[in-house]
């Protein structure tokens, strides 16, 4: 195999696929990146047993870049990636495989790396056919960012470590929960597919990094895998097996009190309260509402001290007498994921979860369960 390519073109592709290449995989050859020359295309593949990314570079319109000899090679990503990053900007690189060696030439720079056996490299995931489910990249990124942070960090219940993708007729819903909080985001889609799929957080994190927000992304769900395709790029992720819990039962249908507050001002107050709340296991912050329609945030520890803060509200409906303790870190993360200027806080009482939504919007819901008040 032999090909010629600009250093910046190859570096950009390696920046994408290297993110999913493990330093200690179960199959040693997976420490490498696979480069395959097919006609006028260079196909760059990296991944592990759970996720893979395939970047296709079209060389046919480039006067200097070309596939000289078709074939494939696998080279250790650690040294190859670092070497390419240090090549002259837009330098023309020739890469050639002979025997088990990889020769890399850029001007007066000549390097030889030991290659890996490409025959041992697992076959790439099957590229699905058809149109898939189309969604704008910017919307998909927004939905992921508004939900993935709420997934569980502990492996005790594997299904909760991922995000549940629920396809209904004309709709996609993303749900994440760790049993103490929940994030849900809905969007309208042109699809007749119905089904529930659980994607690992790692796959969603990489998806946000690699997709172009200006492009349309095509989604192809199967029983064991989900594929995301855009122009010249495919990401394949294994699904988490198991049944996701029915979250409809834990979202209150009615509220005793609803309060509208400026999001950033409220977030700033929560983060100040969290300075002392972090001393508690559940980051205890207490919120109180009285007849003056001002929110009072309190956190304290006997060793350090106490924080008390009053916040103005924009609108209050329902019971004006309310006191509830909650995990301040969870609430702050929910507020950070929302971009709107105003948010609505819905309370069912001191022992019911807090519901946080963008003001006058129903497609996003965050839920934070109450905690035992600090002594």
Image (cartoon, helix red, strand yellow):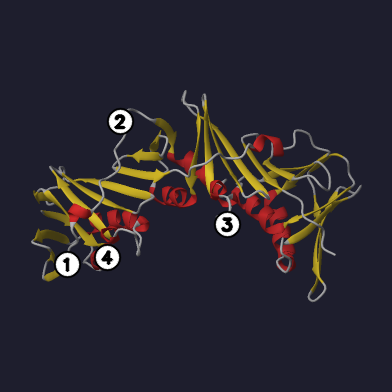
Q: Earlier in the sequence, mark 2 or mark 1?
A: 1
Q: List x then y, in percent, for residue 60.
A: 15, 42
State if disc 1 and disc 2 touch (CB < 8 Å).
no
Q: Earlier in the sequence, mark 2 or mark 3?
A: 2
Q: Earlier in the sequence, mark 3 or mark 1?
A: 1
Please rate how many residues cluster around mark 4, counting C-alpha atoms within 10 Å: few if below 14, some from 14 to 19, many from 20. Answer: some
State if disc 3 and disc 2 touch (CB < 8 Å).
no
Q: Which mark is residue 129?
A: 2
Q: Which quarter of the figure is the C terminus placed in?
A: bottom right
Q: Secondary structure at mark 2?
A: loop
- Residue shown at 38% from the left, 40% from the top: 228
Is residue 257 shown left or right of residue 242? right
Image quadrant where residue 101 sits: bottom left
Estimate the spatial distance between the alpha carbons at disc 1 and disc 4, rounded to whole Å.
Answer: 18 Å
Estimate the spatial distance between the alpha carbons at disc 3 and disc 1, rounded to whole Å.
Answer: 39 Å
Q: Earlier in the sequence, mark 3 or mark 4?
A: 4
Q: Which mark is residue 154?
A: 3
State if disc 4 and disc 1 touch (CB < 8 Å).
no
Q: Which residue is mark 4?
A: 85
Q: Which mark is residue 174?
A: none
Q: Which residue is mark 1?
A: 114
């Amino acid at each position: 195999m032999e090909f010629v390519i600009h250093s910046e073109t190859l570096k950009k592709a390696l920046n994408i696929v290297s993110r999913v290449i493990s330093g200690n995989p179960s199959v040693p050859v997976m420490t490498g990146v696979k480069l395959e020359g097919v006609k006028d295309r260079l196909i760059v593949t990296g991944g592990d047993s759970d996720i893979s990314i395939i970047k296709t570079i079209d060389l046919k319109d480039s006067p200097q870049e070309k596939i000289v000899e078709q074939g494939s090679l696998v080279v250790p990503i650690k040294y190859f990636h670092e070497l390419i990053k240090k090549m002259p900007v837009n330098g023309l690189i020739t890469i050639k495989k002979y025997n088990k060696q990889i020769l890399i030439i850029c001007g007066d720079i000549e390097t030889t790396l030991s290659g890996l056996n490409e025959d041992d490299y697992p076959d790439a995931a099957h590229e699905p056919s058809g149109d898939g489910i189309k969604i704008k990249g910017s919307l998909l990124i927004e939905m992921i960012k508004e939900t993935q942070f709420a997934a569980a960090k502990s492996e005790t219940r594997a299904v909760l470590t991922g995000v549940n993708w629920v396809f209904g007729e004309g709709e996609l819903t993303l749900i994440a929960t760790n049993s103490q909080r929940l994030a849900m985001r809905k969007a309208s889609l042109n699809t007749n597919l119905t089904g529930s799929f659980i994607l690992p957080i790692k796959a969603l994190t990489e998806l946000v990094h690699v997709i172009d927000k200006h492009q349309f992304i095509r989604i192809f769900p199967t029983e064991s895998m989900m594929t995301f395709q855009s122009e010249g790029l495919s990401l394949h992720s294994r699904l988490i097996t198991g049944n996701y819990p029915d979250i409809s039962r834990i979202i209150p249908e009615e509220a005793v009190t609803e309060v509208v507050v400026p999001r950033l001002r409220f977030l700033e107050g929560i983060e100040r309260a969290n300075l002392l709340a972090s001393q508690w296991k559940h980051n205890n912050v207490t919120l109180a509402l009285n007849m003056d329609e001002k929110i009072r945030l309190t956190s304290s520890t006997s060793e350090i001290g106490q924080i008390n803060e009053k916040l103005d509200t924009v609108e209050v409906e329902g019971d004006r007498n309310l006191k509830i303790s909650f995990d301040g870190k969870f609430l702050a993360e929910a507020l950070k994921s929302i971009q709107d200027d105003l948010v609505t806080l819905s309370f069912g009482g001191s022992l019911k979860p807090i519901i946080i939504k963008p003001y006058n919007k129903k497609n996003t819901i965050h839920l934070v369960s109450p905690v035992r008040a600090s002594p």
